[in-house]
Image (cartoon, rainbow, N blue to C red):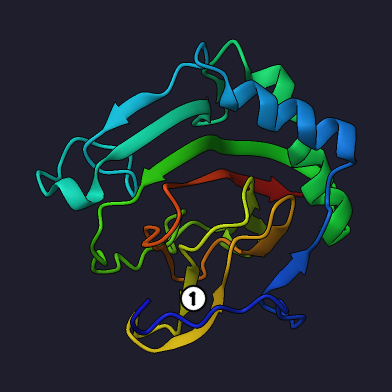
Amino acid sequence: MTGMKQNYNGLKSGKFNLHRNCLGKTQFDVLKDAISTGEFPWFFQRDTTYGTGVSFDSSYHGFRHCLVKDNKKNSDFTELFIPVAWTVCDLIGGELESVYSMHLNLIENYNKETPPRPHTDRDLLLPNIDKMFTAILYFDEVDGNTVFYDDDEKTVIYEQTPIENAMIIFPAKTVHSGSNPLVSPFRRVLNINITIK
């Protein structure tokens, strides 16, 4: 895995907070089992970073299930996953104002390293951006790090390897990218964007 630091320790700082075993075993197993059945509806995306059809490079293709979009329920599975947003609030010590978006991503192994696509999940010009947080819940122990960058969107400042039932929480204005797996067959995460009061 060229250039990928496999970091299982996490980083406790003002910017990133990794929480292992963040959900109770029963809750986590129910969520993981739900997305692991052949009946769970995964929807093809040409671009899993942005959730749009703009990329024709198959390296960015994958599957997504959108649970909440623009503060509105978007799935029959929303109620099953929405309590995870409350967990995020408990972990950061804030009171939930809204869940802007929540979606599941499944990225496959393309047998090649995909160039990173640094981005933020929220518009940096939003007036209340400092009250917005992003959380990523990992479903599997796989390769395919979440990579964090300095404001220049080039300098890597931290990488987190997926750990089953671990969640990394960071300010929504943090530049980051997801890496595709090169060893494991796929990488599955729950991405949550919330605003606190």
For label 1, the crowd category at 10 Å Cα-Cα, with few meaning under 14, some 14 to 19 and many 20 or more, is many
Please tell me in which quadrant of the rendered image residue 176 appears.
bottom left
Q: Position of residue 45 (x, y in %)?
A: 28, 33
Please give left or right for residue 83 compared with residue 35 in the image.
right
Percent x, y for residue 118? 34, 68
Against 17, residue 5 (above or below) is below
Task: Compare residues 160 and 1 and report the one nearer the observer.
Answer: 1
Front-most of 158 and 145? 145
Q: Position of residue 146 (x, y in %)?
A: 50, 66
- Residue type, label 1: Phe
Whether residue 83 is visible: no
Q: Residue at point 50% right, 15% down?
A: 38
For label 1, the SS is strand
Reply above or below: 145 against 77.
below
Name the image quarter holding residue 30: top right
Q: Which residue is mark 1?
A: 148
Which residue is nearer to you in this view: 110 or 159? 110
Number of callouts: 1
> Residue 66 location in percent, x, y?
48, 27
Q: Measuring 65% from the left and 46% from the top, which residue is drawn there? A: 194
Q: Residue furthest left?
A: 56
Residue 95 seen anywhere in this rendered image of the structure: yes
Q: Please, is residue 167 above or below residue 151 in the view?
A: above
What residue is rendered at 51% in x and 70% in y? 174
In the picture, measured across the screen, residue 82 lies left or right of residue 55, that is right
Q: Is residue 60 above or below residue 32?
A: below
